[in-house]
Image (cartoon, rainbow, N blue to C red):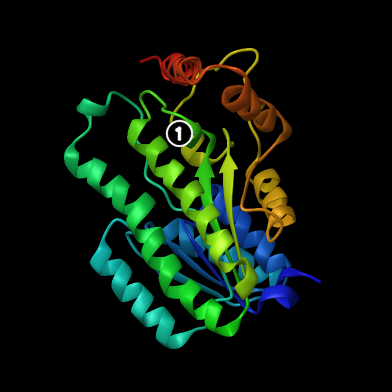
Amino acid sequence: MNLRERFGNTALILGASEGIGEAFSKQLAEEGMNLIVVARRKEPLEEMGQKIREQYRVTVDCICCDLADLKGVEELCKNLSQQREINLLVYNAALAYIGPFEANSIEHHHKMAVTNIITPMYITQLFGSKMILKGNGAIILMSSLAGFQGSGYLSVYAASKAFSRVFAEGLWYEWKQRGVAVIACCAGATSTPNFLDTNPGKPGFFAPKVQTADQVVKECFEKLGKQPSFVSGTGNKIAAFIMQKIIPRKLAIKIMGDTTKKMYRL
């Protein structure tokens, strides 16, 4: 049974124009699902949408929305909830900042909190409630290895990714007997345009291998409906186990901070 047969005809992907969001969109289209794709930048979103229409012969609706703007998000959700039934939801959008906490503006910290915490909570409640009434649906929330402990120079981003994982795990328990599959995908370094644009240096010999977006998405769909959260990739799983189960938390925090500091020459 493919994803369309399992959940329904339509998927909503937020943060869809490139990287992991684009990989989710392509995989869902390959499974025969029609797409509603949302991102802030119009041109790359529409270019991606056209490629998927031509390759997979599915419907792709492209919507531009700044997910840090709650009024815009409310209008988006109002229109979608009246017009379409959403069977599978992927929240991949995120804002990040790499550097000293105090050097970033409070306005940007606020936008990060809205994009990474408030907006996914709002959208999950709206469309998840409708899935519950139908007794079927799926929700995927993107998290990160950075959210497993304090991460120096990524403090707000890491904290928001911790929220994504814990939020999804709680909903997995609440909704698993009501027909709605919820999962948090905890990815490590992934070769997306956003990651490469940060110009990261080498993290160290023992750091897990950078994954492709397709690898992350493939494993996510394999795990969907089977567990509340997962760490993608064998190397990341080993690293997460060591950081969480073997070494003291203080050391784990130090390793994360030192690694980020080295990678970004801070």
Whether residue 157 is situated above or below residue 220 in the rendered picture: above
- Residue drawn at x 66%, y 70% is 54
Q: Residue furthest bottom?
A: 82
From the viewer's perspective, is 107 left or right of 14?
A: left
Task: Say which residue label 1 marks.
Answer: 197
Residue 261: quadrant of the picture: top left
Q: Quadrant of the N terminus?
A: bottom right
**Number of marks present in the image shown:** 1
The image quarter in which residue 31 lies: bottom right
Taking the image as drawn, is residue 112 in sight? Answer: yes
For the residue pair 180 and 40, the one nearer the viewer reads as 180
Q: Position of residue 190 (x, y in %)?
A: 58, 37
In the rendered image, the residue lying farthest to the right is 1
Look at 57% across and 68% down and name the residue there. 175
Residue 126, image x and y in percent?
41, 74
Camera-side residue of 34 and 111: 111
Instruction: Please say if 52 is above or below 239.
Output: below
Frontmost residue, 219 versus 165: 165
Amino acid type, mark 1? Asp
Can residue 64 be seen in the rendering of this structure? no
Residue at 25%, 41% in the rendered image: 109
Residue 150 pos. (x, y %) = 41, 28
Q: Provide residue 207's location: percent of width, then percent of height.
A: 62, 20
Helix, strand or loop under label 1: helix
- Left or right of 136: which side holds 222? right
**Quadrant of the drawing holding the C terminus:** top left
How busy is the neighbourhood of tag 1: few (under 14 within 10 Å), some, or many (20 plus)?
few
